[in-house]
Image (cartoon, rainbow, N blue to C red):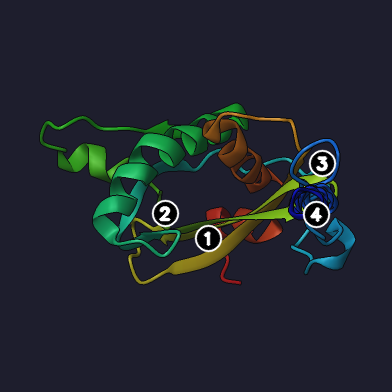
Amino acid sequence: MRKKLEVAISVAFLSTMLFAFGCGGPATRVSEEPNYPSVADIPPVPVYEENETAWDTDTTCWIGIADDATWNNMGSEYARGNFTRDLVPLMKAELISEGYQVKMFGPDYITREKRLSIQRLILCKDFNVNKIMVKEGQCFDMKLTVIVINNHQQEQKSQCEIWARLLLSKDESRQWNDIYGTCVANMRKSPEFRKCLAGSSI
């Protein structure tokens, strides 16, 4: 009688374990994909139209970094290194491709003649990159803020923002310079930036 009772208890225990874990082993939870918003559901950023108006490329420019520059809300020391390494070369290449002459001076003393040859100082003030996961993949919203100063009339200055949105598929990857370049490429489309370079206040 005792042996039958022990068998019955063992069977009951085994049945309980099989019910709890399933015949194939411990149960695994089915992971659900995050419920990301669609691109259409997130706040839009300014979109620029293709502008066929010719640039006023007689202006000679110089690109630098503002003293109070920020990079994704980080301090100016960090921003200065990133602006110089990543953004300034991209901006220089973009303006040169449009026909501008962009001066870049080395560590040597800048003579008065060289200083006077510059007509517009373009200072990078702020750059923000916001990555948002969406149903379509990865969305990068970017805003580059620049100050343009008339070098011969220092009090004449303007500030403008250049926006961009880049959408990549979930499996797509790009170098950061390619991502930043999407924003820099909008310099030529931005009417505000064109006005700044021409010396018009906005």
Of label 3 and label 2, which has the lower sequence position?
3
| Residue bearing mark 1 | 199
Q: Earlier in the sequence, mark 4 or mark 1?
A: 4
Which callout, 1 or 3, points to the residue nearer the camera? 3
Q: Residue at x 66, y 30 (%)?
A: 173
> Are the residues at dot 1 and dot 3 in contact (C-beta closer than 8 Å)?
no
Residue denoted by label 2: 124
Query: In this rendering, which labeled residue sits more in front, label 4 or label 1?
Result: 4
Q: Kindly report the distance in space between the C-alpha atoms of the residues bearing marks 2 and 1.
A: 17 Å
* Image-based side of 17 in relation to 62, left or right: right
Q: Residue at x 33, y 52 (%)?
A: 79
Residue highlighted by disc 3 = 52
Mark 2 falls on what kind of element? strand
Q: Amino acid at mark 4?
A: Met
Is residue 123 visible from the viewing direction of this image? yes
Residue identifier under label 4: 1
Task: Report x, y in % for residue 181.
Answer: 59, 37
Distance (Cα) linking label 3 and label 2: 25 Å
